[in-house]
């Protein structure tokens, strides 16, 4: 499953490193303060201090396809 992490704007680099360390992953996408990671287990995510919220990604769509 893929999850979106809304990172704190205070220190995005530190927030990113915190999530990567806790999830033990190196494969991710980031844009502005939103991080996208594929995960199997969410148990350790309660420890994240610099993450505002975590959401499951349901689907991806382009702006063009949403206007139809």
Image (cartoon, grey):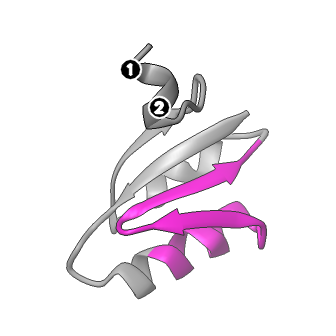
Quadrant of the image containing the C terminus: top left
Q: Neighbour class for label 2 at 10 Å: few (<14), some, many (≥20)? A: few
Q: Is residue 25 magenta?
A: yes
Residue at position x 35%, y 66% in the image:
33
Asked whether 54 or 27 is in front, the reply is 27
* Front-most of residues 65 and 46: 65
Looking at the rendering, in which quadrant would you find the N terminus? top right
Q: Which residue is mark 1?
A: 67
Looking at the rendered structure, the secondary structure element under dot 2 is: helix
Residue 32 colored in magenta in the image = yes
Asked which quadrant contains residue 9, the reply is bottom left
Instruction: Estimate the x, y position of residue 17 in percent, counting from the top left.
Output: 55, 81
Q: Residue at x 67, y 39 (%)?
A: 2
* Residue that appears at 68% across and 61% down: 23
Please name the residue shown 42% across and 85% down the image. Answer: 14
Q: Which residues are magenta?
A: 16-39
Q: Pointers 1 and 2 in contact (CB under 8 A)?
A: yes
The Cα–Cα distance between marks 1 and 2, rounded to whole angstroms, is 6 Å
Give how far across and how far down residue 62 sits, in percent.
52, 36
Relative to 22, residue 44 above or below: above
Q: Observer-nearest residue: 20 or 34?
A: 34
21 displayed left or right of 38: left
**Residue 64's mark?**
2
């Amino acid at each position: 499953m893929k999850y979106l992490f809304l990172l704190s704007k205070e220190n995005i680099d530190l927030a990113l490193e915190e999530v990567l360390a806790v999830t033990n992953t190196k494969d991710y996408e980031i844009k502005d303060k939103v991080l996208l990671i594929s995960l199997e287990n969410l148990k350790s995510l309660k420890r994240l201090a610099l993450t505002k919220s975590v959401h499951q990604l349901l689907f991806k769509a382009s702006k063009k396809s949403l206007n139809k």
